Image: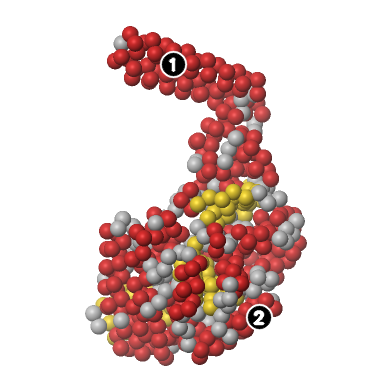
């Protein structure tokens, strides 16, 4: 397997705070508990205080959940290890259609690999994946984009009229049958009847977005021991009830700290990822199946049209904890109260908003796990690799945008003999211009700038003529546009990174059974903060 490694700062569209976190931690250490390094994980593990009673209760709930999702023997074994004292290496993501964007799988693989490496050095650890089933943004999870033979295939379920329900409770419905049939056929055509079977067994009309996602992940990671966690479980809400109470009882102090953190981030030149206002709280309330943000007013709270006195709502966190759920800043704190988390595997934006969550961690838990970046991948198939070589391109050239990409492809499309002639003549002209320039400058030094401008103008027009010749060749052969479309669809889909826009299943279908394991090996803690460009076999 050919592989090229890039640092995250070499990728487009990376958050500034994330890059500083990885490259210059000293500049941002006031926003985080730990540096992003494996030694920090081992140190934090030694200090981790997690009650045995909570461990037993949470593990029991997770065992029931994972058995219901079809977990394999490795996962059940890891649940036993968790109950016996192992720490958790956690990641998570929204429950996107057909496994969502590829980075959902990459997060899970990184958690699996880090857990294995820690276990190997004497720190028992298990990987846990938090499925964001409580999220109510249906539009984020109801569609998926696949790359298939040079085209982007879009799968999409309808946006139901009743919005605001947690996606983990929304059934897929009859519309899923046609989509899953088409998707399964594509996987089979790519060479994997097994993946096609996994998809058809997981995505059925009676399943929800959450249960279907969980069953597919249980299949994919059956040999990796990944523990899945569904936070919609009423038992988990009961365990988390003290945190909900704390979030409301200490709301004023927490909000003041969050507002100040926003100012501190702004002063340091960073943007706050989550907007916090004077009325913000850390909780949502579920009423009649609809998830609504809880807002604060003097002495009372409000969600939708309902209003409660402060003491009344605090009391409700104990009597009906299943009707409360955390917002984006509080969710990881709840997660790490429920789990003995030593490290959290996060994406770039997540690591940025953990700089806000840190004040909540400090106030509520007094601890925070190490934030490690997930491994990143761009997968290059055989045809794309051939095209890149043909036009003298790199993946970075494709990321740079259509205009520059087209110019480079046109230059390389000039017929061989004409191209060599262009090269020879350009060198001769450059030499002639240099000689003329030297003579003119001796005659009148003030003409140096004019000579340089003239030289650049002549070179520009020669290069433009060369590109036009390439374009003329393309019009005869009709290839460049098709090749450009192929490369951009695969490597820069919707002008974004492949891992953020495309589902990984079609790539795994072509790669074969060992694909996930190969990616897992590269997700090592020894190469934290790297992105891998991989040529598929």
Residue plotted at (57% across, 65% down)? 110
The spot of residue 466 in percent (x, y) is 55, 23
Residue position marked by numbered label 1 in the rendering:
434
Q: CA distance from mark 1 to mark 2?
A: 74 Å
Q: Is residue 417 above or below residue 494?
A: above
Q: Is residue 371 above or below residue 61?
A: above
Q: Is residue 366 above or below residue 318?
A: above
**Left or right: 155 with respect to 137?**
right
Residue plotted at (28% across, 82% down)? 300
Q: Closer to us: mark 1 or mark 2? A: 1
In the rendering, which numbered label is found on residue 295? none
Q: Quadrant of residue 521?
A: bottom right
The residue nearer to you, when weighing 304 against 13, is 13
The residue nearer to you, when weighing 71 against 296, is 71
Q: Quadrant of residue 383?
A: top right
Q: Is residue 105 above or below residue 121?
A: above
In the rendering, which numbered label is found on residue 77? 2
**Left or right: 12 with respect to 214?**
left
The residue nearer to you, when weighing 499 against 291, is 499
Q: Tally the numbered discs.
A: 2
Q: Quadrant of residue 20?
A: bottom left
**Left or right: 99 with respect to 139?**
right
Q: Earlier in the sequence, mark 1 or mark 2?
A: 2
The spot of residue 487 in percent (x, y) is 60, 43
Can you name the residue that lies furthest to the top here? 443
Mark 1 neighbour class, 10 Å CA radius: few under 14, some 14 to 19, many 20 or more: some
Element carrying mark 2: helix
Residue plotted at (55% across, 63% down)? 525
The spot of residue 139 in percent (x, y) is 50, 63
Element carrying mark 1: helix
């Amino acid at each position: 397997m050919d592989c090229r490694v890039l640092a995250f700062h070499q990728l487009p569209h990376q958050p500034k705070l994330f890059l500083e976190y990885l490259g210059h931690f000293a500049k941002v250490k006031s926003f985080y508990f730990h540096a992003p390094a494996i030694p920090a994980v081992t140190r934090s593990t030694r200090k981790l205080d997690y009650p045995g009673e909570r461990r037993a209760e949470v593990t029991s709930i997770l065992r029931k959940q994972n058995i219901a999702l079809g977990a394999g023997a490795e996962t059940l074994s890891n649940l036993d290890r968790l109950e016996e004292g192992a720490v958790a290496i956690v990641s998570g993501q929204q429950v996107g259609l057909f496994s969502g964007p590829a980075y959902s799988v990459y997060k899970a693989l990184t958690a699996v690999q880090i857990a294995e490496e820690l276990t190997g050095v004497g720190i028992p650890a298990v990987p846990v994946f938090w499925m964001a089933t409580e999220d109510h943004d249906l539009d984020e999870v109801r569609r998926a984009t696949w790359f298939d033979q040079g085209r982007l295939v879009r799968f999409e379920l309808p946006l139901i009229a009743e919005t605001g329900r947690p996606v983990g409770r929304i059934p897929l419905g009859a519309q899923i049958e046609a989509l899953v049939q088409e998707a399964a056929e594509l996987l089979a055509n790519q060479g994997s009847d097994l993946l096609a079977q996994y998809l058809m067994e997981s995505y059925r009309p009676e399943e929800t977005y959450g249960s279907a996602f969980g069953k597919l992940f249980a299949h994919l990671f059956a040999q990796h021991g990944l523990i899945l966690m569904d936070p919609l479980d009423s038992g988990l809400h009961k365990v988390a009830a003290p945190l909900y109470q704390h979030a409301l009882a200490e709301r004023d102090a927490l909000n003041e700290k969050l507002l100040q953190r926003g100012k501190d981030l702004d002063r340091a030149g960073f943007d706050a990822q989550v907007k916090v206002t004077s009325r913000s709280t850390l909780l949502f309330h579920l009423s009649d199946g609809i998830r609504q943000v809880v807002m604060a007013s003097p002495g009372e709270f409000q969600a939708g049209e309902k209003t409660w006195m402060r003491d009344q709502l605090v009391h409700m966190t104990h009597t009906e904890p299943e009707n409360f759920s955390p917002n984006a800043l509080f969710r990881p704190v709840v997660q790490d109260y429920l789990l003995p988390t030593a490290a959290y595997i996060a994406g770039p934006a997540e690591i940025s908003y953990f700089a806000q969550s840190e004040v909540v961690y400090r106030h509520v838990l007094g601890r925070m796990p190490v934030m490690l970046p997930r491994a990143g991948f761009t997968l290059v198939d055989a045809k794309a690799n051939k095209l890149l070589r043909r036009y003298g391109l790199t993946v970075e050239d494709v990321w740079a945008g259509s205009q520059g990409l087209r110019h480079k492809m046109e230059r390389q499309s000039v017929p061989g003999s004409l191209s060599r002639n262009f090269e020879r003549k350009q060198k001769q002209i450059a030499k002639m211009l240099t000689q003329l320039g030297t003579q003119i400058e001796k005659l009148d030094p003030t003409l140096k700038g004019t000579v340089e401008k003239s030289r650049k103008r002549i070179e520009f027009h020669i290069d433009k003529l060369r590109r036009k010749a390439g374009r003329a060749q393309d019009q005869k052969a009709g290839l460049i546009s098709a090749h450009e479309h192929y490369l951009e669809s695969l490597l820069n889909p919707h002008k974004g990174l492949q891992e953020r826009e495309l589902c990984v299943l079609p790539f795994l279908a072509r790669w074969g059974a060992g694909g996930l394991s190969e990616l897992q090996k590269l997700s090592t803690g020894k190469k934290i903060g790297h992105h891998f460009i991989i040529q598929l076999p």
